[in-house]
Structures are given as structure tokens and as C-alpha cells.
Amino acid sequence: MVTIESLPTAVVYGLTGVPEVMQNVRTILTTRRGTLPLDRDFGISFEFLDSPINTTKAKAEQEIFMQLKKYEPRAILRQIIWIVDAMSGKISPTVNVEVNPNVVW
């Protein structure tokens, strides 16, 4: 299992296997939906911002699950851990994923 934090990193070209899947997951999680010109549905929607924390967490988890299923079916979502700062209202996800061995590379 690999943990992905929602921090952007440099793209490495030519990856294969598990590193490629993890890089793709990170790219999905750190791209705001609507910003990729050739696929406006790619990435995570930010429409739930400024909602109550529990609502934001629920909607974000659904969004993460659906986008990973659609854009990186080789990744299996195992867990989302939330870091919550209730005073500032800020939350950050840490996503744990595995690579599905049954998906053809």
C-alpha cells in the first residue's frame, strides 16, 4: 500500500508499473476539475469548499473515489485519512492506495 498526500510534485516521464500508477493518482488528486483543456472532467471538483467540514469530507471522499475509478482503474482506494484543523476550518486528505494486480498493464 502506498500513501499519497495531496502535494504536487514534478512529473517524471517514462515511469512504468507501480510508480506510474502512483504518479497518476497524485496528478488526479492535485488537479482542479475544469483546468485541463482537453478533458474538463479530469481532476477533483472544489464545489464543496466552504461547506461544513463533515459535508466537505463526505463529498471529497466520493469525488476521490469516482475520479480514481474513472481515470486510474489500476489503483484501489484503501483509505482516506483526514488531517483536520477545526480552528481554521482547514482539512487535508492523505490517500492510501494499492495497485490492482488484476488490471492488465
Image: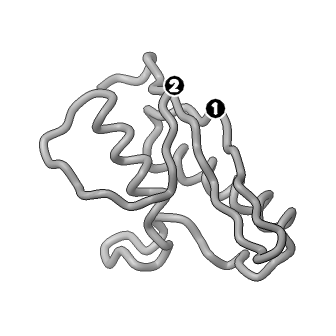
Residue 7 to residue 12: above or below: below
Q: Residue furthest top?
A: 101
For the residues bearing labels 2 and 1, Cβ distance under 8 angstroms: yes
What amino acid is at disc 1? Answer: Arg
Q: Residue at x 63, y 54 (%)?
A: 93
Q: Position of residue 7 (x, y in %)?
A: 44, 59
Comparing 18 with 63, the one in front is 18
- In terms of image quadrants, where is residue 52? bottom right
The residue that mark 1 highlights is: 78
Q: Is residue 2 above or below residue 9?
A: above
Q: Secondary structure at mark 2?
A: loop
First-in-chain label (2 vs 1):
2
Residue behind mark 2: 1
Q: Residue at x 58, y 44 (%)?
A: 95
Residue at 71% across, 71% down: 90
Identify residue type, mark 2: Met
